[in-house]
Image (tube, grey):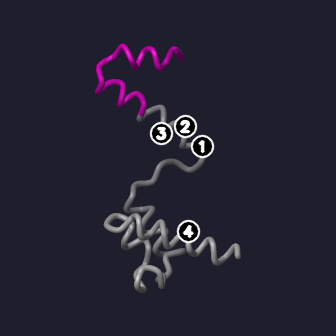
């Protein structure tokens, strides 16, 4: 077991999660950091969210929380159509 993992395994759960969060934020900082779901949703909506015929004209980003299986199926269909 890695030394840091061993320390986390032997500490209280709250401390382990906090230490993991700090380590994760540090690791991702070099690549631009971590964004929250609302920020990601806004960026997707602004740059690539198009209405989809497979979703009855809805935008996938609007249905990802409520209709995830349908959104995934629409994405697979789009990929199939693009690749031929």
Which of the marked residues, 2 or 4, is nearer the chain's N terminus? 2
Going 42% across and 79% down the picture, which residue do you hit?
Answer: 55
Between the C-alphas of marks 2 and 4, the distance is: 31 Å
3 is higher (above) or lower (below) than 23: above
Q: Residues within 10 Å of mark 4 (few under 14, many from 20)?
A: few
Cα separation, mark 1 vs mark 3, equals 9 Å
Where residue 46 sits: x, y (%)? Answer: 48, 75
Residue bearing the label numbered 3: 25
Mark identifier at residue 27: 2
- Magenta span has 4? yes
Contact, mark 2 vs mark 3 (Cβ under 8 Å): yes
Left or right? Give the position of 9 relative to 24.
left
| Number of residues whose C-alpha sits closer than 10 Å to that of mark 3, classed few (under 14), some (14–19) or many (20 or more) | some
Q: CA distance from mark 3 to mark 4?
A: 32 Å
Q: CA distance from mark 2 to mark 3?
A: 5 Å
What residue span does the magenta drawing correspond to?
1-20
Mark 1 or mark 4, earlier in chain: 1
> Are circles 1 and 2 on residues that touch, CB within 8 Å?
yes
Check whether the beta carbons of the residues at disc 1 and disc 3 lie within 8 A of each other.
no
Residue 63 image offset from top left, x and y in percent: 37, 71
Work out how far the residue at label 1 is from the one at label 2, CA to CA, in angstroms: 7 Å
Direction from residue 52 to residue 63 in the image, left or right: left
């Amino acid at each position: 077991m890695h030394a840091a993992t061993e320390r986390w395994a032997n500490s209280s759960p709250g401390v382990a999660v906090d230490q993991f969060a700090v380590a994760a934020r540090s690791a991702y900082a070099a690549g631009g950091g971590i964004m929250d779901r609302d920020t990601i949703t806004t960026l997707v909506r602004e740059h690539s969210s198009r209405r989809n015929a497979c979703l009855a004209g809805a935008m996938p980003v609007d249905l990802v929380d409520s209709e995830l299986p349908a959104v995934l199926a629409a994405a697979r269909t789009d990929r199939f159509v693009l690749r031929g």
